[in-house]
């Protein structure tokens, strides 16, 4: 494994997807992920993510640091707690969070994910 600094703006092919039909609540969102870094344990990842407008259910098994770089999203927990994030906002979604992601304006974020394997 290289010990070189990894930039999160190089040329990495985007993985394009959409939320699974059983989780989709509104719209036809298109998701793009560019994963620039994965550690040797496959527990830590970092990269860029973007999405078009839509709403879907989420259930996190990982901890994720998000830094919004564009757009506006509304994240709502199953308990009804609502948070709106825009470009420049940074937040953590902890493992165990369940609720919805709603992209109100096409958005983009930088992410760092840790998912414990044990």
Image (tube, rainbow, N blue to C red):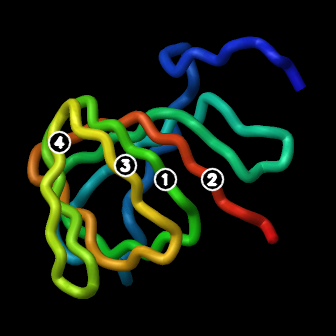
| Secondary structure type for disc 2 | strand
| Secondary structure type for disc 3 | strand
Q: Earlier in the sequence, mark 3 or mark 2?
A: 3
Q: Which residue is mark 1?
A: 64
- The quarter holding residue 62 reads bottom right
Q: Which mark is residue 106?
A: 4
**At 28% from the left edge and 37% from the top edge, which residue is drawn?**
68
44 sits left or right of 86 in the view: right
| Secondary structure type for disc 1 | strand
User: Is 96 located above or below residue 12 in the figure?
Assistant: below
| Whole-number angstrom distance, CA of label 2 to CA of label 1 | 6 Å
- The quarter holding residue 55 reads bottom left
| Secondary structure type for disc 4 | strand
25 sits left or right of 12 in the view: left
For the residues bearing labels 2 and 4, Cβ distance under 8 angstroms:
no
Q: Which mark is residue 29?
A: none
**At 41% from the left edge and 60% from the top edge, which residue is drawn?**
93
85 sits left or right of 67 in the view: left
Q: Viewer-proximal residue, 19 or 43?
A: 43
User: How many marks overall?
Assistant: 4
Q: Earlier in the sequence, mark 4 or mark 3?
A: 3
| Whole-number angstrom distance, CA of label 4 to CA of label 3 | 10 Å
**At 57% from the left edge and 49% from the top edge, which residue is drawn?**
113
Q: Which mark is residue 31?
A: 3
Q: Position of residue 48 (x, y in %)?
A: 45, 34
Q: Earlier in the sequence, mark 1 or mark 3?
A: 3
**At 23% from the left edge and 38% from the top edge, which residue is drawn?**
89
Q: Which residue is mark 2?
A: 114
The mark lying in front, picked from 2 and 4, is 2
| Whole-number angstrom distance, CA of label 1 to CA of label 3 | 17 Å
């Amino acid at each position: 494994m290289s010990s070189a600094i990894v930039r999160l703006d190089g040329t990495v092919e985007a993985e394009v997807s959409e939320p699974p039909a059983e989780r989709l609540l509104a719209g036809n969102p298109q998701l793009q992920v560019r994963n620039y870094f994965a550690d040797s344990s496959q527990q830590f990842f970092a990269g860029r993510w973007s999405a078009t407008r839509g709403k879907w259910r989420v259930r996190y098994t990982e901890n994720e640091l998000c830094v919004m770089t564009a757009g506006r999203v509304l994240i709502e927990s199953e308990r009804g707690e609502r948070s709106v994030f825009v470009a420049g906002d940074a937040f953590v979604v902890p493992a165990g969070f369940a609720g919805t992601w709603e992209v109100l304006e096409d958005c983009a974020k930088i992410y760092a994910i840790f998912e414990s394997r044990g």
